[in-house]
Amino acid sequence: MLLLSFAAVLLLAVLVSALAHRTILSTAALFLVAGFVLGPQTTGVLDIEPDSPIVATLAELALFAVLFSDGMRVGWGDLRSAWRLPTRALGVGLPLTMAVTAVLAHLVVGLDWPEALLIGAVLAPTDPVFAAALVGNQKVPYRLRHLLNVESGANDGLALPFVILFLAVASGSTDLHLGELATELALGLVIGVAVPLAAIMLERLRWFGTSAQYAPLNGVAIGLLVLALGQLTHGNLFLAAFAAGSTIATFGPRQRVAFKHFGENIAELLKLAALLVFGALISIEFLGEISWPGWVFAVLAIVVARPVALAIAFFRSGMHAREQVAAMWFGPKGFASVVYGLLVLNSGIDAADLVFHLVALTIVISILTHSSTDVLVANAFDETRRTAPDPLASADTHQDRGRPS
């Protein structure tokens, strides 16, 4: 039933995609709502539970694919030429977001500090899936798009050590495995750089050559090899994915161009499938189990934690006010938090179920709000709309104006 449900909702999403491109309607929200309706505690069409293997697998694959594709938008030259704002966001904004979220969890929900810090780490990363709605929109200034792309691509891997660290503290473990965490991050980075470099160098040898038909599959093969080696060596998959995409963007411009549209479609399919499955975990009963302080926390985690953190991080940064406000608001939660939330749920700590409920609620609210406001944020930078053109003269151009779901 999962395949049939996904195919039916995908067809519906395709049929309404033109409308979604012009309005606040979001295909991401469509799949989330469809999962909610079809879930085991609503209509029972889909039999999916949080511990079902398909949940963690799809979320992990979707996040890997999106990070790999997003990495291809950011070559090392781009990072060297515009590193100040992403460094502020990652070096100051990320830990401050964790801290503010933890304080909210402790004061509003009453979580003990270990669990509060844990949920702060789980919810700190922004999601590259939904950030792509602005990153891929040419109406948005390049500096803001670059910031959101680099930040959302890197903060998933950077938050993981904190998740595992605070999870160990919350479980009462005295062995924090810091050396193991460092090894995982280092392996992920090495695999993400070495595998694409080797593949690109091999293709340049006179004994090899890629036909036009198979050129788009080159990126797929590299991505799968990075994924497989990451799983085999227990390297950080998310850091490996972003590093691999960035390496291809730097040293393999031809491979980057060949993979672009094909790879983005693969990432989109995985993302939508994961949203359908995640939505199936949510129900009226599930939401009803969350107390009113939990709802207050979820809202504050979105509208307070990141804005406060980035307001401090970007103090005297030289950003235009409109860009800074957009960056402060557009910090969507998604697959990284889903994966980390499932890790907490299966950890066996006393507050595991409560933490997962709060994480899931925050993600749902974030998906609905951020995926329905990306058009509004992008339009705020659209100078052609500011000049109020003749609606009849611009009718045709509005048909082509789109956004990623």
Image: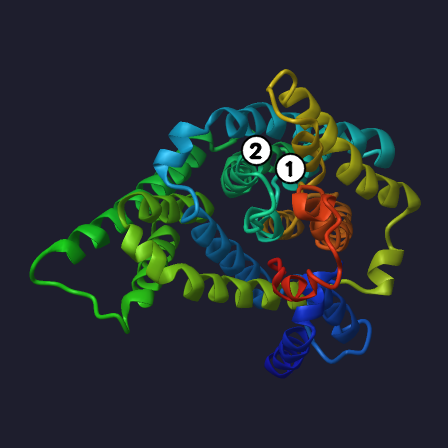
Look at the numbered disc 2 and give the secondary structure of its residue: helix
Nearer to me, 290 or 312 = 312
Distance from label 1 to label 2 (Cα)? Answer: 10 Å
Q: Residue 344 location in percent, x, y?
A: 64, 47
114 left or right, relative to 179: right
Which quadrant of the figure has residue 283?
Answer: bottom right
Decide: marks 1, 2 in contact (CB < 8 A)? yes
Residue position marked by numbered label 2 in the rendering: 162
Count of labels shown? 2
The quadrant the C terminus occupies is bottom right
The circle drawn on residue 238 is: none
Which quadrant of the figure has residue 207?
Answer: bottom left
Residue position marked by numbered label 1 in the rendering: 124
Q: Residue 137 location in percent, x, y?
A: 58, 50
Q: Residue 21 location in percent, x, y?
A: 67, 63
The quadrant the N terminus occupies is bottom right
Nearer to me, 78 or 222 = 78
372 left or right, relative to 191: right
Classify 120 as above or below 25.
above
Residue closest to the far right: 292
Q: Amino acid at mark 1?
A: Ala
Residue found 65% across the figure and 66% down from its top? 396
Residue 356 visible? The answer is: no
